[in-house]
């Protein structure tokens, strides 16, 4: 697990740019930092960042790596890593599991391994199989491979999107990185403008969906995609290399088969040369992972749970009971009652505007956990596999209107910012059924966004990938054998899962040099569940299939399947009214200034007044505007300070 970056330009890039890009990655890779640079003729320039100080000559190409050492922590496994003759290089972030059998194939073909690292395996696999080696990678990864034999660069993002990859491509010059802030130093000063549609997308979804980022000239590589750059012609190409299987089993998949696949996914993620732990809540997903760990001989692992001082939000008592039944030591990490001293750093670590309130307790949980272990397993992905969110049922109940209201999908103009539930209802019925799904967990409705941004000609009420393929007419013409719930889950797989759930997990853990692994998003396990008959996969209550995976808990008095889902909700309203109250006064005017008038300060101020008069239902929207203002302030300052 690491931070990566690099650039391939048609001109010399100052060494100071390498330093700035590396500086943005150091939290992600605290154990080692290196860079390799090439001259225009592909001869080596400067090897490591330690040699860059005072060097102003610059070079047109570089790979940059900041390492969190998990497997084979010896310096020989540091990156960037090269093959024997220096013709192929890799710069990689993530973990690949279960590759020993493939390594034996490579050894039989003559490959010699000098390390125990998965980095070297990927490098050797690429040399043997080319880009098709992706099919043999099981895990989470963001990979850059430079092949000087054919003058080509590959950027690859894992199937589920656990690891991030952003890039900038301007006039044939390409830069990439793990974060927006690691790429920004490469972008010319006059090209660092906001993407106004990204701001609108953030208001709609509480994050900026791929392929956009908050900057017009920085893009995000979608999950399950690779990008290639021909270094001779400067031609850029992208391709989706994986989708879940289409085949649907006629009969339920036997318990023994899916349990074996799940156990393999969990067990292979326990391989590490650093201490290992588990994030444990009171929910089904993390309890499933913990139960399988206990049953497969890993009961000595420590579990970590976030604790809140309000009982209605606190999962720690139930989590402690679960840990006791499974035989795990459990540590409750109290989320502070005040965020005043840390909020600026949290916004910084979230990289760009990102307004999931649960990111704050996630950040605190990771900060304490990293003092004890360097790797944790979590339960991310269960809700997206088994339709565990309440929003699915709610939206399915509106399916009757799928072909009654056609939906013009346009953005309404100049509506009241405080429209509330009435505005949301009218916005929903004017959208087609697929796009209306976004309103189940949206930030601002299309009407509210129109009130905030009256001069913006809205491109779309929804900024999700895959929506162009989903229309009411298509639904009438082609029935999905998995049913509409599977279509909603596919929308999530392309958008909400990689760019909201998994982005939060990556940013909050890597901010503290902690690696998070997600067994439930193992692509072999995911594919198996995806192929299950709908009657086996989707149940009421949800996730009944997983009862079999937790025999220890089934025999106890802990009933996870009928318990009310608490989520991971912090005391947001309290924070806004106490810790962050003084931050709100200037927020409306600052937003108007920072967005060059795109966001109307008076509309934001009107919403703030309503909130302060006791309308607490606007708390999440006020928080969303505050995060936008704070993040844009930081990024505005950064883009002005960079060379």
Image: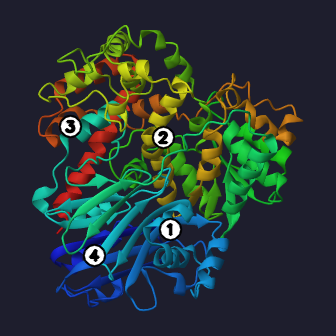
| Residue 463 in picture, x, y percent from top left | 31, 35
Closer to the camera in the image, 312 or 614: 312
Distance from label 3 to label 2 (Cα)?
32 Å
| Residue 240 in picture, x, y percent from top left | 40, 52
Q: Residue at x 42, y 73 (%)?
A: 91
Distance from label 3 to label 4 (Cα)?
31 Å
Camera-side mark, 3 or 2: 2
| Residue 575 in picture, x, y percent from top left | 45, 35
Q: In this view, which residue lies farthest toward the right?
A: 555
Distance from label 2 to label 4 (Cα)?
34 Å
Q: Residue at x 53, y 35 (%)?
A: 570
Camera-side mark, 2 or 4: 2
Whether residue 488 is visible: yes
Tag 2 residue: 493
Residue 203: name its quadrant: top left
- In the structure shown, which secondary structural element does the residue marked by tag 4 occupy? helix
| Residue 597 in picture, x, y percent from top left | 12, 35
Whether residue 616 is visible: no
Tag 4 residue: 18
Tag 1 residue: 133
First in residue order: circle 3 vs circle 4: 4
- In the structure shown, which secondary structural element does the residue marked by tag 1 occupy? helix
First in residue order: circle 3 vs circle 1: 1
First in residue order: circle 2 vs circle 4: 4
Distance from label 1 to label 2 (Cα)?
23 Å
Tag 3 residue: 591
């Amino acid at each position: 697990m690491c931070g990566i970056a690099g650039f391939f330009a048609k001109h010399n890039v100052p060494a100071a740019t390498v330093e700035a890009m590396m500086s943005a990655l150091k939290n992600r890779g605290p154990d080692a930092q290196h860079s390799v640079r090439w001259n225009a003729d592909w001869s080596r320039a400067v090897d490591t960042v330690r040699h860059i100080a005072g060097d102003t000559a610059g070079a047109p190409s570089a790979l940059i790596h900041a390492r969190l050492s998990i497997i084979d922590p010896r310096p020989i496994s540091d990156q960037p890593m090269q093959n024997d003759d220096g013709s192929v290089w890799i710069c990689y972030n993530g973990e690949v599991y279960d590759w020993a059998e493939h390594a034996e194939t490579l050894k039989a073909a003559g490959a010699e391994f000098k390390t125990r690292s998965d980095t070297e395996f990927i490098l050797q696999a690429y040399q043997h199989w080319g880009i098709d080696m992706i099919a043999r990678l099981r895990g989470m990864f963001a990979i850059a491979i430079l092949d000087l034999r054919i003058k080509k660069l590959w950027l690859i993002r894992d199937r589920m999107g656990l690891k991030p990859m952003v890039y900038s491509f301007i006039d044939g010059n390409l830069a990439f990185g793990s974060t927006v802030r690691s790429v920004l130093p490469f972008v010319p000063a006059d090209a660092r403008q906001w993407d106004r549609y990204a701001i609108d997308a953030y208001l709609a979804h509480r994050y900026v969906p791929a392929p956009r980022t908050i900057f017009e000239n920085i893009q995000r590589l979608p999950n399950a995609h690779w990008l290639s750059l021909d270094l001779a012609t400067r031609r850029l190409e992208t391709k989706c290399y994986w989708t879940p299987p289409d085949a649907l089993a006629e009969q339920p998949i036997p318990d023994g088969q899916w349990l074996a696949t799940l156990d393999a996914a969990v067990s292979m993620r326990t391989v590490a040369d650093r201490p290992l732990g588990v994030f444990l809540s009171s929910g089904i997903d993390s309890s499933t992972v913990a139960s399988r760990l206990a049953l497969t001989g890993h009961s000595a692992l420590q579990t970590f749970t976030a604790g809140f001082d309000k009982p209605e939000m606190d999962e720690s008592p139930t989590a402690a009971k679960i840990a006791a039944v499974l035989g795990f030591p459990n540590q409750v990490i109290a989320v502070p009652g005040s965020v005043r001293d840390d909020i600026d750093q949290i916004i910084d670590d979230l990289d760009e505007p990102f307004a999931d309130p649960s990111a704050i307790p996630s950040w605190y949980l990771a900060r304490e956990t990293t003092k004890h272990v360097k790797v944790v397993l979590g339960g991310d992905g269960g809700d997206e596999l088994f339709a565990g969110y309440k929003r699915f049922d709610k939206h399915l109940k509106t399916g009757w209107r799928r072909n009654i209201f056609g939906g013009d999908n346009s953005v309404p103009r100049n509506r009241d910012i405080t429209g509330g539930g009435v505005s949301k209802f009218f916005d929903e019925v004017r959208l087609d059924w697929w796009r209306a799904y976004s309103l189940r967990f949206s930030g601002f409705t299309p009407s509210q966004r129109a009130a905030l941004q009256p001069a913006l000609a809205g491109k779309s009420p929804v900024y999700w990938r895959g929506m162009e393929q989903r229309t009411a007419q298509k639904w009438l013409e082609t029935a999905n054998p998995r049913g509409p719930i599977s279509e909603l889950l596919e929308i999530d797989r392309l958008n909400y899962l990689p760019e909201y759930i998994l982005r939060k997990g990556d940013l909050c853990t890597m901010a503290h040099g902690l690696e998070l692994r997600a067994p439930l998003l193992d692509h072999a396990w995911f594919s198996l569940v995806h192929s299950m008959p709908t009657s086996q996969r989707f149940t009421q209550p949800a996730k009944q299939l997983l009862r079999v995976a937790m025999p220890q808990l089934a025999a106890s008095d802990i009933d996870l399947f009928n318990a009310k889902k608490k989520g991971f909700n912090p005391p947001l309203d309290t924070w806004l009214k106490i810790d962050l109250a003084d931050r709100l006064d200037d927020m409306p005017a600052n937003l108007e200034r920072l967005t060059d008038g795109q966001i109307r300060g008076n509309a934001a101020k009107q919403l703030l007044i309503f909130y302060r008069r006791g309308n607490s239902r606007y708390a999440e929207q006020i928080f969303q505007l505050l995060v936008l203002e704070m993040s844009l302030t930081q990024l505005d300052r950064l883009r002005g300070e960079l060379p």
